[in-house]
Structures are given as C-alpha cells and as structure tokens.
Image (cartoon, helix red, strand yellow):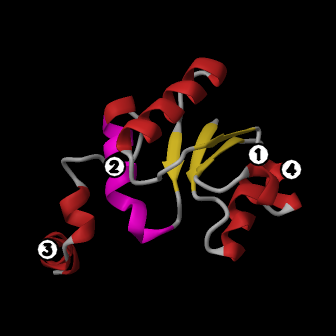
Amino acid sequence: MNVVFLSPHFPPNFYSFCVNLRRMGANVFGLADEAYESLRPELKDALNDYYRVVDMHSYDELLSACGHFTHRHGKIDRIDSQNEYWLETEARLRTDFNIFGVKNDEIGNVRLKTRMKEIFIPLTV
C-alpha cells in the first residue's frame, strides 16, 4: 500500500502515524515544505520517499509531487494528513489521482456541519 502523508512533521506528535503505517507494511511518502534534514529521525526512518515543495498551498506543486510518487512507486492508495486544514486539498488530490477516500463531490459533507447533520440524523432514527 502506497500512502502519501501531507505535512508529516506537523503537529510534531503526528510523526507517529507515519511510523506506525510503515510498521504495518505501508510505503509511506512524505510531502511537505519542510527541509528533509530538519525532520525528526524517527520520521525520516519511516518514510520511503520524501518530496519537498516550496509552498504547500500551491496545488501545482502538490500535483507534481504526487505525480513523482506515482512514477517512482506506482499507484497511490491513500492520501492523508490527520489534519483538518488539508481536507479539501486531500479531496482534490484523491479526485485527480482516483484514490480511495473522500473526493471533491463529497467534501462538503465533511466540512459543513449542516450537511453532516442531514446525513447522520436519518441514520439515528
């Protein structure tokens, strides 16, 4: 399984997600604007590959990075960050690379509390 993890270094305690993904046998690819050399050693050891972008808000850079991972390692199976800030970016990348998970047409159901309520209320009745 190939997993791209956005900003695996932030917040600082989130590196353990990558460590445990790797421990479970996943190939873990870090994608961030942080210099590889400044990543904590445990995180560097957990990453199979790392791609540094200048600006995490530049979708073109993120698209290129995911293309790089696909070219080098094959199809990406998951994209995650465990950080709500990147939900829309994750959905867009999943849509563009046809990756399992919440995509552009579903992100509103996750981001908007009113939409969540509409979905979950019928499930509890």
**Secondary structure of the residue carrying numbered label 3:** helix
**Secondary structure of the residue carrying numbered label 1:** loop
| Residue denoted by label 2 | 91
The N terminus lies in quadrant: top right
| Distance in Å between CA atoms under marks 1 and 4 | 6 Å
Within 10 Å of disc 3 (Cα), the crowding (few <14, some 14-19, many 20+) is few
Name the amino acid, label 4. Answer: Asp
Name the amino acid, label 2. Answer: Ala
Residue reaching furthest front?
Answer: 54
Q: Which mark is residue 122?
A: 3
Of tags 2 and 3, the one toward the viewer is 2
Q: Of label 2 and label 4, which has the lower sequence position?
A: 4
Q: Please, is residue 68 above or below residue 123 in the view?
A: above
Name the amino acid, label 3. Answer: Pro
Asked whether 91 falls inside the magenta stretch, the response is yes
> Measuring 53% from the left and 48% from the top, which residue is drawn there?
54
**Secondary structure of the residue carrying numbered label 2:** helix
| Distance in Å between CA atoms under marks 2 and 4 | 27 Å
| Distance in Å between CA atoms under marks 4 and 3 | 45 Å
Q: Nearer the viewer, residue 29 or 106?
A: 29
Within 10 Å of disc 1 (Cα), the crowding (few <14, some 14-19, many 20+) is many
Image: magenta residue range: 83-95
* 43 relative to 73 in the view: left or right: right
Q: Which mark is residue 45?
A: 4
Q: Where is residue 98, by image quadrant? A: top left
The C terminus lies in quadrant: bottom left
Say whether marks 4 and 3 touch (CB < 8 Å).
no
Q: Of label 4 and label 3, which has the lower sequence position?
A: 4
Q: Position of residue 65 (x, y in %)?
A: 53, 34
Q: Which mark is residue 47?
A: 1
The secondary structure making up most of the magenta span is helix
Q: Please, is residue 40 above or below residue 95 in the view?
A: below
